Image: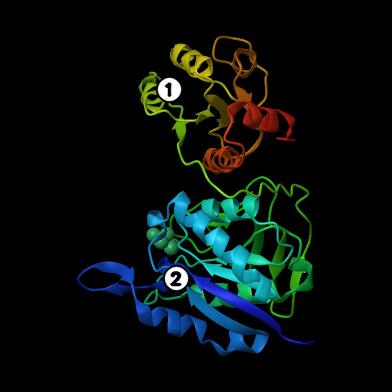
């Protein structure tokens, strides 16, 4: 079979870092050459490499993610697929933003490393080879943006970084991986039936995420409101319940036509309008809070940035969210 023509876009992260005695783990230009010249990569596909940036992923802002999305959109016309190397810390946010805004059917695969260049059991080379193999696979088409780590393939929407150090950190906690990468072949076991696309030419970044903790007051909500946030994502308890101390500030937000979306701070599961007490999910929904389904808070924040970027109108965003499957 003819080799695929793929583009690797590098953005930095641990995969491009090495230990330095003075500074600790930092970016290192040699790492890219080392990683990208593994014979296993070139045997699988014809590869071009392009550096987009070389920064740790905590430095990656939504604006940078959006620029990267536009670059992928432009470049993928010339290639059979694109692989992006990224830091693990914010990889799931970049992957999800790309997943929402890109409409290509071609494979777009993000990968990273948990271990830097001087660590024993370096996972970067294996992950890049895995990502190239996945991007070369016919079945990887039309699957949305994929994340490849530790011989597994996950959907951008579902995967989360679950562990700070282990190489099997990236897991789709609710639904499991889409497939695996075995030595002889790449195998997909399932499709994600959620294939949401929100193509947009701009992004609205003034969206806040507030996590519920017991005994909290409303100061973060008030701070968001005084900074003119367009929407608030509240990471509520369990099925979507918040302490009553938040209610006056949430009412104020809704009166100002600020969208409020409740998601759960639990690791898996949906929010639902079950509890009718003051602050319960049913009570919140009656007030006008939107219940955000099974999306985790940081991903709902990205989705709202994309939705406000596209519609720039809270009523349209509300309508969109109320009519989506979440
Ligand atoms: N702090 C690093 C980053 O996200 C971690 C990593 O890449 O694994 O850039």
**Residue 302 in view in this figure:** yes
Task: Decide which of 153, 62 is in the foreground and name it.
Answer: 62
Image position, residue 93 (x, y; %): 53, 51
The colour scheme used here is rainbow
Task: Tell me which label, 1 or 2, sits earlier in the chain.
Answer: 2
As drawn, 19 above or below 222? below
Which residue has dot 1 on it? 214
Q: Quadrant of residue 31?
A: bottom left
Image position, residue 124 (x, y; %): 49, 73
Q: Quadrant of residue 278?
A: top right
Disc 1 crowd, CA 10 A, few/some/many (<14, 14-19, 20+): few
Image position, residue 273 (x, y; %): 67, 20
Q: Secondary structure at mark 2?
A: helix
Ligand 1 under 8 Å from disc 2 Cβ: yes
Disc 2 crowd, CA 10 A, few/some/many (<14, 14-19, 20+): many
Q: Quadrant of residue 59?
A: bottom left
**Residue 161 in view in this figure:** no
Residue at 44 percent of width and 16 percent of height: 249
């Amino acid at each position: 079979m003819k080799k695929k023509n793929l583009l690797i876009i590098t953005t930095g992260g641990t995969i491009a870092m090495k230990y330095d005695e003075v500074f600790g783990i930092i970016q290192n230009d040699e790492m890219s050459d080392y990683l990208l010249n593994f014979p296993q990569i070139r045997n699988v596909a014809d590869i071009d490499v392009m550096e987009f940036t070389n920064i740790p992923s905590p430095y990656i802002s939504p604006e940078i993610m959006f620029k990267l999305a536009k670059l992928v959109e432009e470049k993928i016309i010339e290639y059979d697929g694109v692989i992006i190397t990224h830091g693990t810390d914010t990889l799931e946010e970049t992957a999800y933003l790309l997943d929402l805004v890109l409409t290509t059917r071609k494979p777009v695969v993000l990968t990273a490393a948990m271990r830097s260049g001087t660590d024993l059991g370096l996972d970067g080379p294996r992950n890049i080879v895995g990502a190239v193999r996945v991007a070369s696979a016919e079945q990887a088409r039309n699957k949305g943006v994929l994340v490849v780590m530790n011989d597994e393939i996950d959907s951008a929407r579902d995967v989360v970084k679950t562990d700070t150090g282990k190489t099997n950190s990236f897991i789709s906690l609710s639904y499991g991986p889409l497939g695996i990468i075995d030595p002889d072949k790449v195998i997909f076991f399932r499709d994600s039936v959620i294939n949401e696309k929100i193509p947009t030419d701009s992004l609205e970044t003034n969206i806040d995420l507030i996590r519920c903790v017991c005994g909290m007051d409303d100061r973060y909500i008030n701070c968001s409101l005084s900074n003119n946030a367009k929407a608030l994502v509240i990471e509520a308890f369990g099925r979507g319940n918040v302490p009553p101390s938040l209610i006056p500030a949430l009412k104020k937000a809704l009166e100002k036509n600020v969208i409020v979306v409740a998601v759960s701070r639990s690791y898996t599961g949906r929010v639902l309008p079950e509890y009718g007490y003051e602050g319960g999910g049913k009570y919140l929904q009656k007030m006008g809070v939107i219940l955000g389904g099974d999306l985790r808070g940081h991903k709902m924040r990205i989705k709202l940035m994309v939705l406000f970027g596209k519609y720039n109108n809270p009523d349209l965003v509300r309508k969109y969210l109320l009519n989506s499957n979440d």
